[in-house]
Amino acid sequence: MTDKPTWLKAHGRPWTVTSEKAVYDNPWISLTEYQTVAPTGRPALYGKVAFKNRAIGIVPLHADGTVTLVGQSRFPRGNYSWEIPEGGAPLDEDPLDGAKRELAEEVGLEAADWRLILTMELSNSITDELCYGYLALDLTPTATAPDETEDLAMVRVPFAEALDAAVSGHMPDSLTVALLLRVHHMAVKGELPEGLARLVLA
């Protein structure tokens, strides 16, 4: 990872909260309505969705340069989505433990080499949700245990094919796009083992 550039600094005033009201709550999210003063000094109404889990994404990169992807029907947009393995880790759980659990449950894989490669704010204009993205290497099979609401398909494809599908809009899931691009960036920058980097860049 490179050092933080000097130009990445805050300016101006932060938001100020004058009042807040709980609107909705369930085991996964809460919604709060705020009366605020914006950094410009203007009053503003703001709603924030707070998440009770961290988002987790994993790129399972096999020694032959292939990746395992998951296909499933997603409720919010009513679409079918091909993605990297993903899930959630409760706020009091180590995100790496959550990643290990999700990789095993969704695609039946364990990894001997785990690398945190990216943290992301998924929609910071309306939510506080954070994502921890991992690269999983040195993979071996284990038993799957999908959630009772998950009907999952799996496919293992060359990394270059997965990346091309993601950047072409065929896999628009944001974690998938960002983490596949990050792995490609690692290969370009020499942050992967040389043989694996050649396969990623093939």
Image: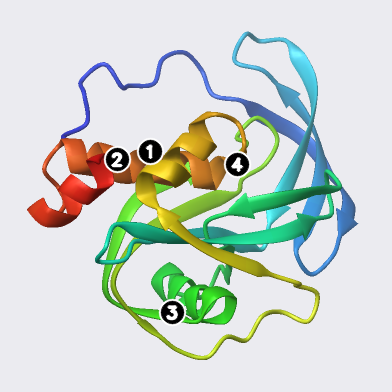
Left of 81 or right of it: where is 110?
left
Per the image, label 3 sits on a secondary structure element best described as strand
**Viewer-proximal residue among 69 and 106:** 69
From the image, tell me which residue sits under label 2.
184
Is label 2 in contact with label 1 (beta carbons under 8 Å)?
yes
Q: Which percent across, then down, holds residue 62?
A: 31, 66
- Tell me, yes or no, whether the two marked residues, 4 and 2, touch with CB atoms within 8 Å: no
The x and y percentages for residue 18 are 75, 31
Q: CA distance from mark 2 to mark 1?
A: 5 Å
Which quarter of the figure has residue 109? bottom left
Mark 4 vs mark 1, foreground winner is 4
Q: Which scheme is used to colour this image of the protein? A: rainbow
Image mark for residue 171: 4
- On the image, the x and y values in percent for residue 168 come to 54, 29
Which image quarter: residue 58?
bottom left
The numbered dot on residue 109 is: 3
- State whether residue 8 is above or below residue 33: above
Disc 4 and disc 3: Cα gap in Å? Answer: 22 Å
Q: CA distance from mark 4 to mark 1?
A: 13 Å
